[in-house]
Image (cartoon, rainbow, N blue to C red):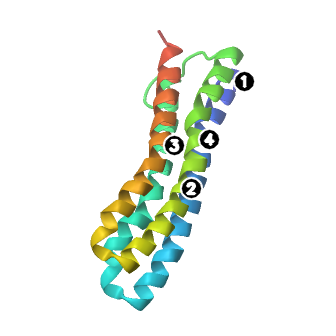
Amino acid sequence: MPYGIMFALAGAALAAALAGVGSILGVRTAAQASAGVVSEDPDKFGKVLLLTALPGSQGIYGFLAAIIIANAVGLLGGELVDVSVAQGWQILVASLPIAITGLFSGMYQGRVAAAAVNIVVKQPDASGKGVILSAIVETYAVLGLLVTILLVNGLGLGA
């Protein structure tokens, strides 16, 4: 396997893996707080479920970036593009915005979501505020995904 394609696929793997780990850790943090609430008051399950699930989106963004990279190099239903070593490195570096923002925003969104679970405990009617606070952290993963998409598309592979 040529080294260029190897570096490109390493970038796809990094995007999916690091953003996925951020989601795993974030969902775990929020779920731990939510489980405590639900054990005391099962009727609050619906309100804490969204807060628990929110940090999972970063993993989806990393997966999407990996698919975009795999498609750009022709791995999905086409001929493999001849990727030079330099282009492979460029793709790997282009994967870093979503890999890094997905990792950290997933972890920290989980912390914010866990704190927002306290809103549900004390003021169940104000749970939407906790969702908004948690969603603000996700903005940076969305920006990381956008940068990765722009960088990968800007390389013009196969053109």
Cα separation between marks 3 and 2: 16 Å
Counting residues from the start of the chain, the first of labels 2 and 1 encountered is: 1
Q: Which residue is mark 1?
A: 3
Give the residue type at disc 2: Tyr
Residue located at (47% from left, 80% from top): 35
How many numbered discs sit on the rendered protein?
Answer: 4
Give the residue type at disc 4: Ile
Counting residues from the start of the chain, the first of labels 3 and 1 encountered is: 1
Callout 4: 10 Å neighbours few (<14), some, many (20+)? some
Cα separation between marks 2 and 1: 35 Å
Q: Secondary structure at mark 3?
A: helix
Query: Where is residue 80, by image quadrant?
Result: top right
Counting residues from the start of the chain, the first of labels 3 and 2 encountered is: 3
Q: Secondary structure at mark 4?
A: helix
Could you tell me which quadrant the N terminus lies in? top right
Q: Which residue is mark 3?
A: 62
* Residue 100: mark: 4
Q: Is residue 156 left or right of residue 93?
A: left
Foreground tag (2 vs 4): 2
Foreground tag (1 vs 4): 4
* Residue 108: mark: 2
Residue located at (55% from left, 49% from top): 105
Cα separation between marks 1 and 4: 23 Å
Query: Residue 59 versus residue 51: which sits nearer the camera?
Result: 51
Cα separation between marks 2 and 4: 12 Å
